[in-house]
Amino acid sequence: MSKYNTFSMGKRAYVLKTIQDVRASYWFLPTVLVFIGLALAGLMGWIDRDASRLPWQLPDTFIDTQADGARSTLAVIAQSIIGVTGVMFSMTLVAVSFASGNFGPRLIGNFMRDRGNQWSLGILIATFVYALVVLRTVQDGIDGGIAEYVPQYSLIVALLLTLLCVFTLIYFIHHVPETINVSHISANIGASLEQQIRDLIDDRDSDLSETKLERQPERAPDAVIRPTTSGYIQTVNFTQLSQLADQHDWFIALDASIGTFLTTETPVFHIWAKNDPSTDDLDAVRGCFAVGIGRTENQNPTFLAEQLVEMAARALSPGVNDPYTAKDCLNRMAAALTVASQYKDGLQEPALPRLSFPHLTFERLFAATFPLCRQYIKPDALVLDHACRLLNDLSGTVKSAEQACIKEEIARLTSGG
């Protein structure tokens, strides 16, 4: 039997990736709400069958609906809700299409992850399912046969859910234009970027801040780990890697940063060990990273920074010519860089003694922002002046060791070449 169980052998990175994908998907929350609707229909059916056990009773005027009236009401609710749901879904597709065409296809994920859209769709679909389930329980009285049955309490809940759907529709009509507002999009990306930077800094273990880091051995590695499929590296379980290195007295170097595209021949991990690692050992390391079909923002703040760059580039294109959107994107970049430098002493090398990887630094984050916008900024005098003022302000804010890359960028922006 393997000394590693299936979970510790590395499926942790794929489990984390799957959880992130599910939580970020458009279908997960609506599906959960559908099951909640089914459960609520079952609960209300039980209450209707044993209404006498309730500690209180509703007035007769609330529970005097006849079978024909209940059936018609529930049918109208179901038909109306599914029709509105179709319109809502169409509006979502139009918004996604507009955003991807104007601001970049990599922003589609932001709209699909939007909780407002997911809750709106889920509430309507759950109400539709609830109405259908309750509808089938309504029975007409037949002489000598089945007695008339009208789920009065279930009908009242259906009406309340319909009222909730009306307010949900009002919210959704307000929410969709708001989500495709360019200032709203850049603000959300900027806030996400700042939060990821703060999370990276907070995750640094203060107890290990004084730990002496080991140097990578100068000899050839004893083992090289390559991916089994090509794709972008999306998730790395650094905690598990550090534990494996400590347990086996290894030094592990991660060559590929998160977001890098890998082929099946790309080295991902180099391992230095005193004894040759076993197959189980290598499988355990191999399972500490997950590869996917595209780049994501998970553990990858530079991906968010590049989304701001793409928005700025599209805004400054001849077909759009929107310098104020570009200026807003530059503002968000400068705010994120300020956080990267000033929040709790800024970005520093993680204290993982036996693990080496291309960690995020201020210089790497800066390289993913203003320098990538340079060719679009220089021809526009308005945006160029704004970018230089932002960089000068940033140079006076960040640490002295981080000022060199900023001053170099200012020089390139103001040069005539």
Image (cartoon, rainbow, N blue to C red):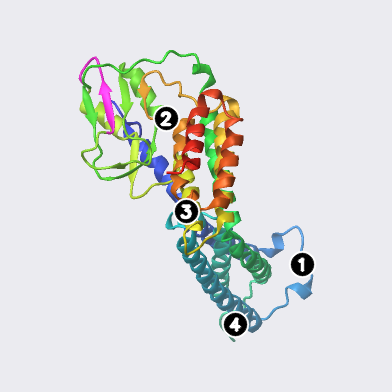
Q: Is residue 205 magenta?
A: no
**Residue pictured at 47% horizontal, 62% vertical:** 318
Judging depth in this view, the residue of 138 and 220 nearest the camera is 220
Is there a contact, CB below 8 Å, between mark 2 and mark 1?
no
Name the residue that disc number 2 marks.
359
Tag 3: amino acid? Ala
Of the residues under marks 4 and 3, which one precedes in the sequence? Answer: 4
Q: Tell me where residue 64 appears, x and y as whole percent.
A: 73, 77
**Residue pictured at 50% horizontal, 63% vertical:** 320
Is there a contact, CB below 8 Å, between mark 4 and mark 1?
no
Of the residues under marks 2 and 1, which one precedes in the sequence? Answer: 1
Looking at the image, residue 162 sits to the left or right of residue 130; the answer is right
Is there a contact, CB below 8 Å, between mark 4 and mark 2?
no
Q: Secondary structure at mark 1?
A: loop
Q: Tell me where residue 287 appears, x and y as whole percent.
A: 31, 35
Judging depth in this view, the residue of 327 and 412 nearest the camera is 412
Of the residues under marks 1 and 3, which one precedes in the sequence? Answer: 1
Image quarter where the C terminus lies is: top left
Looking at the image, residue 312 sits to the left or right of residue 254; the answer is right
Q: Secondary structure at mark 2?
A: loop
Name the residue that disc number 4 marks.
140
Of the residues under marks 3 and 2, which one precedes in the sequence? Answer: 3
Q: CA distance from mark 3 to mark 2?
A: 27 Å
Q: Secondary structure at mark 3?
A: helix
| Disc number placed over residue 58 in the picture, else none | 1
Query: Can residue 204 be seen by looking at this rendering?
Result: no
